[in-house]
Amino acid sequence: MKRLLTLVLSLLVTGTSFIYAQDVKGKLSEKDIKTIMSSFKKTPTDVALMNAITHNDIKKLAESRSNDGAINHYFSNKVEVNGITNQKSSGRCWLYTGLNTIRPMVQEKYNLSDFEFSQTYNFFWDQFEKANLFLEIARATANKPLNDREVEWLFKNPIGDGGQWTTFADNVMKYGLVPSTAMPDTYQSEKTSMMSRLLRRKLREDGLRMRAIANSRMNEEAKQKAKLEMLSEIYRILVLSLGEPPTEFVWQTKDKDGNISDAVIYTPKQFYEELIGIDLNEYIMFMNDPAREYNKLYEVQYDRNLVEGANWKYINLPNERIKEFAKKSILGNEGMYFSCDVGKQLNVKSGILDLDNYNYDDLMGVEFGMDKTQRIETFESGSTHGMALVGVNILPDGSVDKWLLENSWGADKGNKGYLTMTDRWFDEYMFRLVIHKKYVDSDVIKILDQEPLLLPPWDPMFAPEN
């Protein structure tokens, strides 16, 4: 008995060694390892590549010399825009993109050479509303265990500074807009990581409290009071980090001809209604996701920033149809909210997005062969960044070879703040495009009448742009 106990204890202590000593399927034998090691032939080319790659930036070595200067930045049609914005070290590209889409309307209406909305103002209310949404979902899912996938997702993602068109539209329609002078950027709005970390920490703590409160015998009035106390602390963190959001402000302009306007007092809602005055719900979000059925309406669960807001809905279409509508919008002098996998094949210095910018296959002697569907399904590719689509180059035969993007990384990035995207790159790495319904065919608009297919928030396609 003593010997048996000793053997069992020995196996428990050295369990790993015991397991690997067996004939386990998939185990690499010494012979397998030697075969793999011998596959590297150490030819002069192999050695030269190893020397180069071990001492240099892989991306720089893969840059295609033949593509240098092959693509210019000329466009036959371009939306009239002025001024490049800079989101700095923040995940607010969705907000910059949304505001940059409607900004030219103000510049044209008031004959301004430059104008910028306050991103910090809308970001403040985005974060506040997302905190409220998190607490409400925590309350609604309080009967589920913490290891339930939905609850687990919630506590992993209590709040973030990313978003997409729906979060932008609902935010603006509820809180209005202000000029950048009424609520300028702060250190924390330009570098959001620490503030976001503290908000996540506090909300996780509050989420546990909300679960306990939901399952308690407290009446609804007491439960609501407890939630408002939690949100008051969130509001305090936001005010100390971003400043107080204005309830009214004075706006005065100087136009291109030097004329100075009267100083007018606005509320944020009045400012939006007078300067923009359009219903942002009249814009339609399109997706190109070849992993799912086309000509269908989809909805993403919890993908919003208002409790009372709408979940993100989109129509999945082939690229050819989306491009038709995009071209009409640019010809109508209206930019669009555009999102993509910007890091793939981007040459930041030249400002070019093209499939031939970098050749990793030849550098490594290994084929990287997944198509768009496979990249989506394996989390290799998805939408990572939002920009405004503002230009198209239409060739004499009517075809398109490239598109122009207004970025929010500052004027020193890309081509004076812009990126030129080839039509082939559009096909592979564009994911979302928001277009006013007046540029969309009636048969596509009818898809909005469908009952949407509900998708979970952890789907590989739906990380928010930043």
Image (cartoon, rainbow, N blue to C red):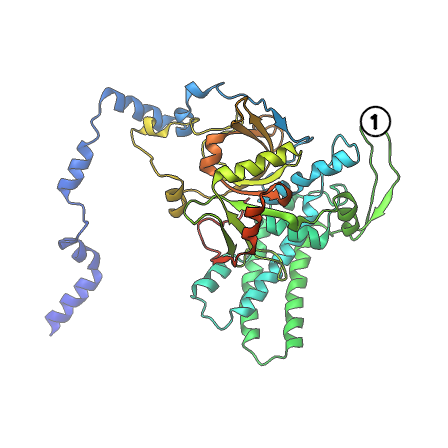
Residue 69 higher or lower than 466, as above or below: above
**Quadrant showing the N terminus:** bottom left
- Identify which residue is drawn at 67% across, 54% down: 125
Residue 417 location (% of width, % of height)? 61, 29
Residue 214's place in the image compared with 152, above or below, is: below
Q: Nearer the viewer, residue 66 or 444?
A: 444
Horizontal and vertical percent position of residue 4: 12, 70
Answer with the quarter of the image where residue 372 lies: top left
Residue at image location 30% in from the left, 26% down from the top: 50
Q: Residue at coordinates 42% horizontally, 49% vertically from top-left?
A: 292
- Residue drawn at (62%, 45%), measured in percent from left and top? 437
Viewer-proximal residue among 439 and 342: 439
Q: Does residue 241 appear in the picture of this structure?
A: no
> Left of 289 or right of it: where is 161?
right
Q: Secondary structure at mark 1?
A: loop
Closest to the observer: 105 or 235? 105
Q: Which residue is the site of mark 1? A: 257
Counting from the top left corner in percent of width and height, residue 357 is at 44, 26
